[in-house]
Amino acid sequence: MIKVAGVIRPVEKKDIRAEGNNYEDAREALQAKIPEGWAPQQILVER
């Protein structure tokens, strides 16, 4: 028999939005809204 152990943490999802004159500006604005300790999972262009 093999026993294993792991460390888990909850995964919370939060949607944020930002705007800019171009993709780079909008992406920078979005990055600035990301709270410390969070990491972006996806960045989508809304049309």
Image (spheres, rainbow, N blue to C red):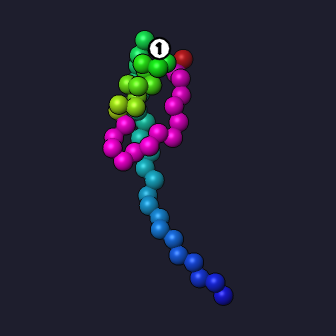
Q: Position of residue 47 (x, y in %)?
A: 54, 17
For mark 1, give the secondary structure. Answer: loop
Span highlighted in magenta in the image: 34-46
Give the residue at the far bottom of this rendering.
Answer: 1
Task: Give the prevailing secondary structure in the magenta stretch.
Answer: loop
| 9 w.r.t. 28: above or below | below
Q: Position of residue 14 (x, y in %)?
A: 41, 41
**In the rendered structure, does residue 43 fall within the stretch colored magenta?**
yes
* Residue under the image location 44 percent in, 61 percent down: 9
Residue 18 located left or right of residue 23: left
Q: Position of residue 44 (x, y in %)?
A: 53, 28
Q: Nearer the viewer, residue 22 or 15?
A: 22
Q: Quadrant of the N terminus?
A: bottom right
**In the rendered structure, does residue 31 fall within the stretch colored magenta?**
no
Q: Which residue is mark 1?
A: 22
Give the residue at the far top of this rendering.
Answer: 21
Q: Nearer the viewer, residue 16 or 38?
A: 38
* Residue under the image location 33 percent in, 40 percent down: 35
Amino acid type, mark 1: Asn
